[in-house]
Amino acid sequence: MQGWSHRLGLVLVGKGYPSAQVTEALGLPVLAGIPDDVKGAQALWHQRGSDSPLSRHAAQLAGQLLHAAHQGSSR
């Protein structure tokens, strides 16, 4: 089983503040951003394998988080 990382980071939803501004204001890195995709979220809730912007970004986010966890555990 994977270990937990104690490093904090943020995932931004939708088009809001720029990542650099959020990082500066909160002092935490922005790991990724995902679209504010209501239809995609509904499709994911009801059906696997949806090809929506949200599902594509969620898959990319999972890979980024896994990569970050591996980097954190090797320190």
Image (cartoon, rainbow, N blue to C red):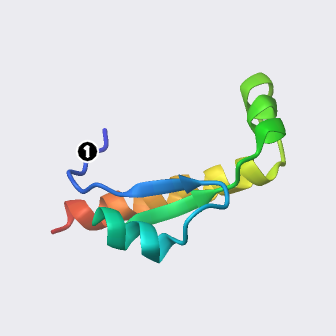
Q: Name which residue lies at 35% across and 57% down.
A: 9
Q: Residue at x 37, y 69 (%)?
A: 23
Tell me, yes or no, if residue 8 can be seen here: yes
Q: What is the quadrant of residue 30 in the picture?
A: bottom left
Q: Is residue 35 left or right of residue 52?
A: left
Indicate the quadrant containing the N terminus: top left, top right, bottom left or bottom right.
top left
Above or below for 43 versus 57: above
Q: Quadrant of residue 71?
A: bottom left
Between residues 61 and 30, which one lies in front from this camera angle?
30
Q: Is residue 9 left or right of residue 59?
A: left
Front one among 74 and 45: 45
Answer yes or no: is residue 49 visible: no
Tell me the element at label 1.
loop
Give the residue at the far top of this rendering: 46
x, y percentage for residue 34?
63, 55
Q: Which residue is mark 1?
A: 4
Mark 1 neighbour density, 10 Å: few (under 14) some (14–19) many (20 or more): few
The residue that appears at 82% across and 48% down in the rendered structure is: 52
Instruction: Give the quadrant of residue 4.
Output: top left
The amino acid marked with disc number 1 is Trp
In the rendering, at what x and y percent does residue 17 appear?
55, 66
Image coordinates of residue 68 in percent, x first then y, are 36, 63
Residue at the spot x=58%, y=60% of the render?
33
Rendering coords of residue 62 (x, y %): 53, 52
